[in-house]
Image (cartoon, rainbow, N blue to C red):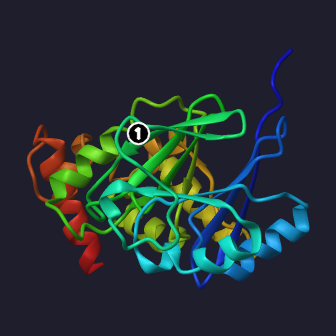
C-alpha cells in the first residue's frame, strides 16, 4: 500500500514571510518550518485541526524565530535548530548539522548546511515527500542576499538544489516573487518561459496568492541565479560566455543588490 502523501499548508506571516506546516497523515505528527510570527502559525493550526509536534528552524534570523517561544508554550512542540546558530534560536531542544536526519512522524528529512545568506543556514530535504524547505537560500525566481560569506559560498549552496527532480516542491522563506521576476526579466529578457512565469506571478498577486511552492524544474528554467552557467546570463553582466558560474552568480547578485 502506498503511504499517504504529506499534507502541506502555506500562509503569510509578518509582511512577506512564508509560514509552512507539513503533516504526516499516517501519524498526525506536524512540523512548522520556522515561526516568523506566532499568530498566523497558531491560526493555521486551528483552521486545520493539526497538532504541532515539531518546529524545524532554517536559520537564526529574528524574522524566522521570533514566534517560537509563544508557539512552543501553546503546543509543546520540539524545536530543532542549526547547531551553528548557537544560542541565537530560542527554546531549542535539538541541534542539527550536515547529513543529519530529522523525523516528523514517519516523514524523514535530510539536513543540508546551505551557508551564504548566513553562516548557520540549513535546508530540509524531504526526499520521499518530494519537498525541500529552503528558507532564505533559494526563492521563487531568486535567492537570498549574501550576508556572512563570499558569493561563491552561496553559489555552492544553490548548486546542491540543481540535481533534484524537476517535480520537487521548493518552499522558501519569503514572498519576493514580483521583485525577483522584475530582476530576472532584466537579466534574461529573451527567456520565454520566464516571461510566462512573471505574468503568472502578477496574476497570483492580483488574486491574493503567491507562487510558493515553486518547482525545481521551473526554477532551473527561469531563475537567473540557478542559471548562472547560461551564456546569456554571463553576457547580461558583461562577462564572456564560459565564465565560471560562480563568477557570473556573484555579478548577478551584486546587480540585484542595486536593482
Q: Is residue 143 above or below residue 254?
A: above
Across and down, in percent, residue 95 comes to 43, 53
As displayed, is residue 160 above or below residue 69? above
Visible residue check, residue 168: yes
Tell me what residue is drawn at x 23 percent, y 61 percent.
Answer: 252
Q: Quadrant of residue 159?
A: top left
Residue, x 29% and y 71% (percent of image)?
256
Q: For label 1, count other residues whose C-alpha is less than 10 Å away and answer few (under 14), some (14-19) or many (20+).
A: some
In the displayed image of the protein, which residue is found farthest to the top? 1
Q: Nearer the viewer, residue 74 or 202?
A: 74
Q: Nearer the viewer, residue 145 or 55?
A: 55
Percent from the top left, x then y, of residue 190?
A: 39, 52
245 to the left or right of 72: left
Q: Quadrant of the C terminus?
A: bottom left
- The residue shown at (69%, 75%) is 73
Residue 106: x and y in percent read 71, 33
Q: Is residue 227 visible?
A: no
Q: Which residue is mark 1?
A: 161
Residue at x 52% of width, y 59% of height: 93
Q: Secondary structure at mark 1?
A: loop
Residue furthest to the bottom: 15
Is 188 on the left-hand or right-hand side of 24?
A: left
In the figure, is residue 80 to the left or right of 72? left
Left or right position of 241 against 210: left
Amino acid at each position: 500500500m502506498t503511504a499517504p502523501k504529506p499534507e502541506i499548508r502555506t500562509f503569510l506571516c509578518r509582511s512577506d514571510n512564508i509560514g509552512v506546516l507539513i503533516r504526516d497523515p499516517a501519524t498526525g505528527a506536524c512540523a512548522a518550518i520556522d515561526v516568523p510570527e506566532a499568530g498566523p502559525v497558531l491560526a493555521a493550526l486551528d483552521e486545520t485541526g493539526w497538532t504541532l509536534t515539531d518546529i524545524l528552524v532554517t536559520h537564526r534570523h529574528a524574522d524566522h524565530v521570533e514566534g517560537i517561544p509563544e508557539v512552543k508554550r501553546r503546543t509543546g512542540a520540539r524545536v530543532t535548530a542549526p547547531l551553528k546558530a548557537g544560542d541565537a534560536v530560542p527554546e531549542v531542544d535539538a541541534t542539527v548539522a550536515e547529513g543529519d536526519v530529522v523525523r516528523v512522524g514517519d516523514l524523514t528529512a535530510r539536513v543540508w548546511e546551505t551557508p551564504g545568506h548566513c553562516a548557520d543556514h540549513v535546508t530540509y530535504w524531504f526526499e520521499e515527500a518530494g519537498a525541500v524547505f529552503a528558507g532564505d537560500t533559494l526563492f521563487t525566481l531568486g535567492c537570498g542576499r549574501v550576508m556572512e560569506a563570499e558569493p561563491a559560498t552561496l553559489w555552492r549552496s544553490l548548486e546542491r538544489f540543481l540535481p533534484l527532480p524537476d517535480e520537487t516542491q521548493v518552499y522558501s522563506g519569503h514572498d519576493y516573487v514580483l521583485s525577483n521576476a522584475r530582476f530576472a526579466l532584466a537579466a534574461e529578457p529573451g527567456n520565454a518561459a520566464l516571461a510566462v512565469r512573471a505574468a503568472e506571478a502578477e496574476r497570483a498577486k492580483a488574486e491574493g496568492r503567491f507562487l510558493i511552492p515553486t518547482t525545481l524544474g521551473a526554477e532551473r528554467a527561469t531563475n537567473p541565479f540557478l542559471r548562472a552557467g547560461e551564456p546569456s546570463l554571463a553576457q547580461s553582466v558583461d562577462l564572456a560566455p564560459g565564465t565560471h558560474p560562480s563568477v557570473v552568480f556573484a555579478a548577478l547578485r551584486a546587480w540585484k543588490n542595486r536593482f
